[in-house]
Amino acid sequence: IATGILAPKCRRITISGNSNATKINGIDENSRVSSRYGGVISYWEGEADQFTSKKPKFRQIELSLKKLTGLCYATDENLQDSSQLEGIIRDSFNGEFGFQIDDGVINGTGAGQFLGILNAGCLVTVAKETGQKASTIVAENVIKMSSRIFASSYQNSVWYVNQNTLPQLYTMSIAVGTGGQLVFTPPGGLSQAPYGTLLGRPVVPIEQCASLGTVGDIILADLSKGYILAEKGGIQSAMSIHVRFEYAESLFRFILRMDGQPVRAAALTPYKGSETLSHFVALASRT
């Protein structure tokens, strides 16, 4: 977890004992227009009026442990000639597992692995601007994206971007009267250090975001409220000299059991307004 960027920000649940899964209750809600929390309504009543009964609607969020594995062979000569090799192998697989967990949070299909943000039913995708050129990000895109995340999530949200989007962000401007103003850099221009924030929220480049112009190249997300990771212990590591004994090779094996998915099954229609909101907002394709 510590080697990743996204995983430490997610809500985490520990599965213990003999269980390989857990179920937790989540609010089953996709609209707040006529009720809240999937069915709760309160009423203004007069004296001695009969009360009306309403209750929230729940859905079960099931997290079943998936298995992430790694395997590595090393000859006896390798291990004898480099006392650091065993530590390098272990550190490398720790880093690789951290990478794969983060990739699952973003891109997981839900089939034998995490359900990622980009494949979840709760993802809100903001359309590109009319006439917008391919492989671009404009100020109107990020302004509209910021309006589609839950208001309560905005202060915890982060912009996750592919590094190849940075030239678009650094040169992004918005019209002000007959002139314009850069959105992502200080008033002094590119000669000064950028704020590192976009509309007040941090911008974090990660490898797992899609390439420029593709859905997922820029994502506004609140992982702390919107994404759950279930884990059972840490990485189980083992070494054996017996598997390939006749080849004088040692085998290193690594296993991690986890699962993850968004808290919500669908985006939410607010009480006022027709545009859906979510913990996760992406920009539509611009290819």
Image (cartoon, helix red, strand yellow):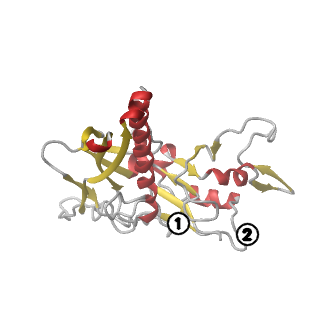
Camera-side residue of 143 and 227: 227
Check the image and report above or below for 109 versus 4.
below
Q: Residue at x 24, y 62 (%)?
A: 59
Residue type (three-letter) at the residue carrying disc 1: Thr
The residue identified by callout 2 is 133
Q: Is residue 226 left or right of residue 17?
A: right
Q: Nearer the viewer, residue 113 or 80?
A: 80
Left or right: 282, with 170 as reference point? left
Q: Is residue 222 above or below residue 145?
A: above
Q: Which mark is residue 125?
A: 1
* Residue beneath the point at 39% across and 52% down: 226
Which corner quadrant of the image does residue 16 belong to?
Answer: top left
Work out whether residue 88 or residue 99 is closer to the camera in this orientation and state it.
88
User: Would you call the spot at circle 2 few (<14 residues within 10 Å), some (14-19), or many (20 or more)?
Assistant: few
Q: In the rendered structure, which disc, 1 or 2, sits on the residue that comes first in sequence? A: 1
Single out the residue that lies furthest toward the bottom.
Answer: 131
Whole-percent x, y for residue 75 in the image: 38, 39
Q: Quadrant of the N terminus?
A: top left
Name, please, the residue furthest toward the front.
246
The amino acid type found where label 2 is placed reads Lys
Look at 27% across and 61% down and name the residue there. 40
Residue 260 position in % (x across, y down): 33, 53
